[in-house]
């Protein structure tokens, strides 16, 4: 929820009501799970709608969604657990407790890419065409899913006294900041950034239908890689709980690689004038 700081303050402080939406006996419905489920349903519906505009059977998106979920959720959790292994080695029963939070979008992407690649190959359809239909939904889903961090009081930034500061309960604070109450709401920064990226991608999609401009297959996917990763680089710099490899923030390293790959792909498409490599065999293209 949002709580006004004072009548003299031009802003609000963010205070999470907690991770549980409601309980029915032993059954607890958590905000995190509800948001993820909502993001998936909205994303699939949107991508099916976009597929119709590409004269593609929308059922293929429904089939793809199952593959993506199977690949992305384990990938997101495995990625996170691997980089936090010292924590989970002490509590191995928490490895599968995904409802408590602790997933990494880059792990979800890797798992999803693997699943989508296999799906595209089996169905003899361009992986880049599928990606262009999925990425607007993906970035919208990320914007929705980030609010799960808010309810779990996790993935917050450095201490701050800005008007939109985020209150973090003492049990969720880093040990070296246990006496600090307010932090940067990095979940909000990324959610808003992702909404801007969604606006860019969906606008380009429908402008492309009118050939204003005409986009080559794979363009939206490459722009997603660049735009999302650009935001992630600077937002990750605020985080206090980044997954680390030595002194490097893993998310920033992966994001910089994604930006470089995205830019290379655009150069390949528009300056060199070649199509992107695909998983569909030549005789089926």
Image (spheres, rainbow, N blue to C red):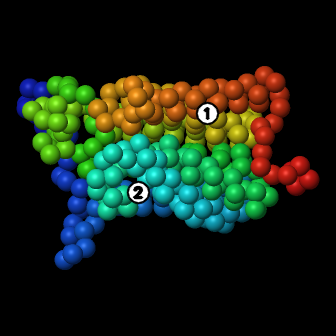
- Direction from residue 31 to residue 61 in the image, left or right: right
What residue is rendered at 30% in x and 47% in y? Answer: 87
**Residue 1 has which mark?**
none
- In the rendering, at what x and y percent does residue 206 appear? 64, 42
How many numbered markers are drawn?
Answer: 2
Residue 152 x, y percent position in the rendering = 26, 50
Q: Is residue 226 left or right of residue 264?
A: left
Residue 200: image x %, image y %? 55, 35
Nearest the camera: 68 or 176?
A: 176
Q: Farthest residue in the top direction?
A: 271
Secondary structure beneath disc 1? helix
Can you tell which quarter of the image residue 213 is in? top right
Q: Earlier in the sequence, mark 1 or mark 2?
A: 2
Q: Residue at x 16, y 25 (%)?
A: 161
Q: Is residue 22 left or right of residue 245?
A: left
- Give the spatial CA distance, label 1 vs label 2: 24 Å
Residue at left offset 25%, top offset 73%: 27
Residue bearing mark 1: 223
| Residue at the farthest bottom position | 25
Q: Is residue 148 left or right of residue 223?
A: left
Q: Residues within 10 Å of mark 2 (few under 14, many from 20)?
A: some
The residue drawn where x is 82% and y is 24% is 272
Q: Residues within 10 Å of mark 1 (few under 14, many from 20)?
A: many
Which residue is labeled 2 in the image?
Answer: 36
Quarter of the image where one finds residue 154: top left
Image height check: is 68 above or below 261? below
Secondary structure beneath dot 2 equals helix
Q: Is residue 68 visible?
A: yes
């Amino acid at each position: 929820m949002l709580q006004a700081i004072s009548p003299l303050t031009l802003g609000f402080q963010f205070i999470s009501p907690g991770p549980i939406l409601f309980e029915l006996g032993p059954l607890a419905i958590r905000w995190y799970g509800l948001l993820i489920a909502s993001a998936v349903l909205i994303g699939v519906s949107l991508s099916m709608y976009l597929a119709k505009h590409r004269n593609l059977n929308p059922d293929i998106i429904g089939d793809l969604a199952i593959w993506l979920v199977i690949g992305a959720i384990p990938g997101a959790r495995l990625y996170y657990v691997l980089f936090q292994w010292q924590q989970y080695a002490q509590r191995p029963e928490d490895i599968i407790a995904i409802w408590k939070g602790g997933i990494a979008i880059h792990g979800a992407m890797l798992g999803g890419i693997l699943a989508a690649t296999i799906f595209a190959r089996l169905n003899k359809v361009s992986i880049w065409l599928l990606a262009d239909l999925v990425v607007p939904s993906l970035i919208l889903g990320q914007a929705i899913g980030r609010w799960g961090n808010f309810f779990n009081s996790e993935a917050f930034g450095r201490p701050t006294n800005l008007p939109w500061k985020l209150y973090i309960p003492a049990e969720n604070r880093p040990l070296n900041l246990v006496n600090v109450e307010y932090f940067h709401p990095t979940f909000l920064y990324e959610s808003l950034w992702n909404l801007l990226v969604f606006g860019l991608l969906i606008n380009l999609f429908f402008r492309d239908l009118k050939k204003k401009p005409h986009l080559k297959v794979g363009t939206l996917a490459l722009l997603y890689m660049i735009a999302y990763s650009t935001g992630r680089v600077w937002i990750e710099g605020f985080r206090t709980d980044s997954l680390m490899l030595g002194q490097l923030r893993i998310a920033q390293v992966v994001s910089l690689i994604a930006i470089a790959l995205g830019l290379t792909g655009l150069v390949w498409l528009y300056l060199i004038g070649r199509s992107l490599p695909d998983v569909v065999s030549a005789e089926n293209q």
